[in-house]
Amino acid sequence: MIARYEKFFFFLSLTLMILFFHFFYMSLNGLPYRFPAYVPVFLIIPFLPAFLSNPIYHLLKMIFMKIGHINSTVLYFIIYYFILTPVGVIRKNRCDLNFGDSKKQSFLIRRGKKEWDLERPY
Amino acid sequence: MYILGISAYFHDSAVALIHKGKIIAAAEEERFSRLKHDSGFPHKALDFVMEFAGITASDISAVVYYEKPFLKFDRLLEATFSIAPRGFSFFKDSFPTWLKDKLFLKQTLKKELRTHKFHNPSLQFSEHHLSHAASAFYPSPFKTAAILCLDGVGEWTTTSLWRANSDGMELIEEQVFPHSLGLFYSAFTAYCGFKVNSDEYKVMGLAPYGQNHYTEVLKKHFIEIKDDGSFRLNMDLFDFMKKSSMLNFKQASKLLGFPPRVNGSSIEDCYCDLAASVQRITEEIVLKLATSLREKTGEENLCLAGGVALNCVANGLISDSKIFKNIWIQPAAGDSGGALGAAFSAYYLKDFLRKKTEFSDTQNGSLLGPSFSSSAIKDLLREQGRSYQEFESQSELFEKVCQLLAAGHIGGLFQGRMEYGPRALGSRSIIADPRMPDGQRKINLSIKFRESFRPFAPAVLKEAISDYFEVQNMSPYMLIVARLKEHLRHNQNEIEGARGLAKQKILTSDLPAIIHVDYSARLQTLDEEIHPYFTKLVKAFYDKTGCPALVNTSFNINGEPIVCKPSEALTCFDKTGLSFLVLENCLIIKEDKGGFSK
């Protein structure tokens, strides 16, 4: 069973790594951009997913072995509630649901002159 | 060198090809694949533009995708976090696709392009609203302009205000997800029982049947609007971040006092009233934004793009308000137009090129798709054993067509290059005499097989427009609604007293097929320089009947894309109540309507 689905678990770990990479680096207001003085500390962050994904990896293995097959809903349920929700709770979000509570005149966000970089997909 | 713009993987995939800042060809994939709003990679549209230009992949200097996929993913992640733990349903539905495909879009695009013999293409990524803004400004006839882009959402931006001149475009202000006018409109489109990202225009068509009784409720609970047109949504009532439904139907029905409409059920007055209220709020926001944009930029010219720019009633109000002296709206204002904007942004912004200004726009009448030769059409007709008449001279063909139209027949018109954008502009159109008293019902029910309340648009000669309509700006791409002149209106008191769809039964004017129940019409103003063939046909009809307009609706049946090839036009002709069909210089008439012998 495990050998058969090893590839699948590998992709799960990879997905977690992509997500973490996104949180800390790609996201335009990621930590290294907010705190440039601490950049060396952030260099170890890419290794965090390996530690964090390990218990998830084993938890999923146990569930899937118990039910006898890999269920994608269970997979996404675990990712969502065990990883995304805690991160979502502790992290300041750019998607502001109550946007502009203090704004009296306008909800428009002022932008300045910008050079368009078409080479990057982000 | 040529630049290729691509929009794909959301809805309305399309390809556009430009050369030295001039549009060579552009087309939506749905016309070729026959899948409405096709979101796949536009293989067939790409084949068409390359073949049309007579070029190979090596002639293309850059391929530009219309948005930045990683930024979009960034927004999706942030949205998921912001509503955790309530967004599991949305996460489960959308993330597998992203993690498997969309996140690796660069590789996917390269792989798809390789099937068209692109080896290591220079792949670039515009931004969603940059693409919209570029698609509106660069083909426009203006040297300087203010640009307003309004849509559902791209990466983060939902509304953007720009200033543009020949040196480039500057984003002045924007609003970001989840506060979106497009999503607000779509949410109530779903509540009225119509399809999201597809049927928004039905809500616009339904609005004149209702009264804006719900405007206050909507403003109190659903949306807050500031004086400069900026707004925010009450995210406790909108569900588009949590699951695939757009609105919290349970809470919304408590506030509105009636449940969401089931698709296909009868349309009661409350839904007409809701449509009217949503439309009124949209108009208020668009007008306020236009006013503040004028104040901020001082520009006299306005360019519009984004899906909300297809709301021609709101466009008509901007035009009537005279906030701007001139208005130009991208005919493919939705995401398909993003392909064109992406190509333009790479051409002008990457190399800091100056925009060349022409006397007229460079959209070529939006006739940017494929055309078919007379000989190919004749071969097809012979192959299918059709009886037809071939006309040597255009005037003879027009004479016969006008005779049929004046006798109350409804026909299909298939000629020249196909239109780019959702409107039929005389190349793939269904045409009829607008004076027919039951024209709207007849075309809706026996030809288009769609809801009877939906109005039809007129194509009117530019010279005659001011005799009939109160109009400030020309509308060659059918994107501005104007009101019929007061003295030409019939039964105003009866219409004001009627409720809901009962208004349909009251005669509005001498042109009932094209005048909606609020005496408005979505105009295509015909200019011989922009649409020469269609203008000549309407002129011939005017000479024969004294009526300077024709009904012009897209050549398709409900739920299908507009026809692209002659064979599709023939199938549509056979399946519907059309009496005749013009295929370039050939005319086919159904046997029971006096067809030709073989």
Image: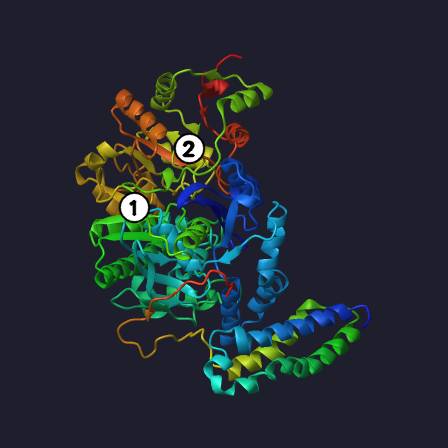
Output the chain of dot 1.
B
Instruction: Inspect the image, locate mark 1, and give the three-letter code of the amino acid beneath it.
Output: Thr
Q: Viewed as shown, does residue B509 lie left or right of B97?
A: left
Task: Tell me which label, 2 or 1, sits earlier in the chain.
Answer: 1
Instruction: Inspect the image, locate mark 2, and give the three-letter code of the amino acid beneath it.
Output: Ser
Q: Would you name the residue on which mark 1 appears?
A: B357
Who is closer to the viewer here, B356 or B503?
Answer: B356
Q: Looking at the picture, how far across and down is residue B484, in whole percent?
A: 23, 40
Residue B268 visible from this viewpoint: no
Q: Would you name the residue on which mark 2 appears?
A: B427
Who is closer to the viewer here, B311 or B585?
Answer: B585
- In the figure, residue B46 lies in which quadrant? top right
Vertical relation: A119 (above or below) A55: above
Output the chain of dot 2.
B
Q: How many marks?
A: 2
Circles 2 and 1 in contact, beta carbons < 8 Å? no
